[in-house]
Amino acid sequence: MLETIRHRGRDDQGIFDDQEIAIGCNRLSIIDVPGGHQPLSNEQGTIWIAYNGEIYNHNELREELTRAGHSFTTRSDTEVIVNSYEEWGTGCFAKLNGMFALAIWDAEQKRLILARDKIGIKPLYYSSVDTNLVFASEYKAILSVGRVDLTINSNFVMQLIEAGYPLSPETLLSGVHQLPPGNYLIASGQGLVVQSYWTPPSLSDASPNIEGVRESLKQAIVSQTITSDVPVAAFLSGGLDTSTVVAFASKARSEGLKTFCMGFGEKTDEFADARLVAETFGTEHEEIQIDASEGMKLFPRMVWHSETPKVNLYTWFVNEAASKYAKVCLSGLGGDELFCGYPNTARFNLGRKVQSLQKLRAVAPIAGAIPGRRPGFLSSLRSKPTAYTSILTGFPDREISNTVKDSVAPYFSGNEDFLQDMIGCEFHTKLPYDYLLVEDAMSMAHTLEVRVPFLDDRLLELMLPVRYRDQMQGQIGKLLLREAMHGILPSQCFEKPKWGFSIDVYSWWRRGVRDYALEYLPASSFLKKYAGEWYDRVMHNIQLPTDPQRSRWYSMAWIMLGLEVWKRTFLQEQPKPFSW
């Protein structure tokens, strides 16, 4: 199992086992490089831990625990978690400000505890194999054990094809489960119990003052920059989020900061914007330009690392570049979700239209305002979940599978307006199961730890209660972030259109994806079985003359291509990267 995911930590490897349990860790050494060997135990050897992640408030917790009578033999944050569990039991997880996937073996109580951080920055999977519970940071390690149930999770396939990413903490295999963010699992003689330890703060009509926002941003970014005994870098697009990170991180370490920007030879490349910010804050800056055809040659390896086929695996390249310099890299992920960064996007604008239409009793006369200008979309307005899934997939209610609608339904309460619920839904689905899982997989593929300061506990508690209407004006979002960073960032950061590390699907389709799709999809028995009617519809559309108006079908074909690669890679007991 450890060798299968050795890429997650090449600095050290350790195993603890006794009659009832074996736990192991591939360590990427960040804090207390010589003293943080894992698995690590308490002084009595009755509590053992293996964990992946970083705890940014470990020094504060160490002081509190020392006052309570605990002693420490290392400087590592791992030992702080062990003593925190001794002091507070499973209540310790809510106290940890950081990202983590961990396993604690309590020998006295004969129980294993698995826990995952509040937002799901770090992944954690588990499965029953014969009479054993098997767990890992990537499920390919679980499959390496053999004898794992390889039944396909058809609901998950539909989520990927229709939405483009998972909407729930599942996997493509029915027998392999993802521990939900903000949850812990207890395995004992009484069986398995999964419990939540964190609930996001409730919405409020109050709005934080700008000084408080600025100070919380600074504290979160500086804390995550200095909590490392090894070099730290940062991704930089020149937009508000990454520029904010660079502004505060650039002066936090004596050796300075190295920054990385990625482009694809397209008009949306952000090299000039990033270069301006790098010059403003004196970072050592590097630009990486990616060619679509070259990128597709590595697509099978990306799928092997991600374990969930998606379109947005291209961050592989910027992570690869950063890993040659640093073990830790800062990301701007989470800034859009916390500060409402999407009001000028197509999806948000469709949400505005739906919100307006839902207030009207008779909508048929204005069906032309509905996505796609098809009367069939009228049925999607009957409820907020169906309206959202129509926006998400681009198809009317009658064409969307129940698994997609059922997955998002819990996030639409009926107490808030449509846009507020829509934002909450994306925070609990797209952020953890798309953006964060992709970032973890593509960074750890290169043994690089990516940190997300915008998802620091301080900012979560401050910003999650803020309603979207207090963060936007017309098509402009991030009002609080803009005010907080006014006078700190160059004026161009506030003026540039939102793009981020994104790609033009149509461009990639023409320059690389199409040839592979037309070669591998027609003969795919796997897709014919699990993709249902979508298979025939996608195959029809991709064989028509190439047209940017069909980009939605090209995205679906790309996902299907990834599913075919996944099948050839993972439907065996020992998964190995497939190559074209």
Image (tube, rainbow, N blue to C red):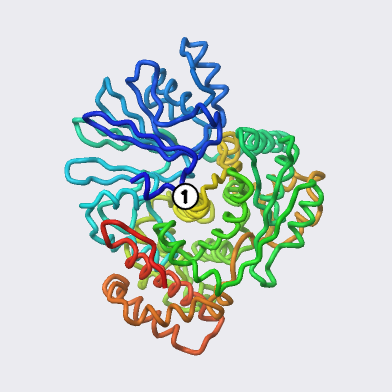
111 displayed left or right of 39: left
Q: Residue at x 55, y 71 (%)?
A: 294
Q: Residue furthest left?
A: 131
**Mark 1 Cα-neighbour bin, 10 Å: few <14, some 14–19, many ≥20:** many
Q: Residue at x 55, y 29 (%)?
A: 32
Q: Is residue 156 left or right of residue 548?
A: left
Looking at the picture, tell me which residue is in the foreground, 87 or 431: 87
Q: Quadrant of residue 161?
A: bottom left
Residue 60: quadrant of the picture: top right
- Total labels: the figure holds 1
SS for callout 1:
helix
Image coords of residue 437 (percent x, y)? 46, 52
Name the residue: 42% across, 82% down: 518
Residue 395 screen position, x and y as percent: 43, 72
Q: Nearer the viewer, residue 178 or 386?
A: 178
* Residue 89 visible in this rendered orientation of the protein: yes
Residue behind mark 1: 432
The residue located at (51%, 48%) in the rendering is 447
* Quadrant into which the C terminus falls: bottom left
x%, y% of residue 248?
A: 72, 40
In the image, residue 156 above or below residue 374: above
The answer to whether residue 117 is seen in the rendering is: no
Query: Considering depth in this image, is 565 or 493 the residue closer to the camera?
Result: 565
Q: Nearer the viewer, residue 393 or 122?
A: 122
Residue 368, given in percent of the width and then of the height, sits at 53, 77
**Amino acid type for the residue under numbered disc 1:** Pro
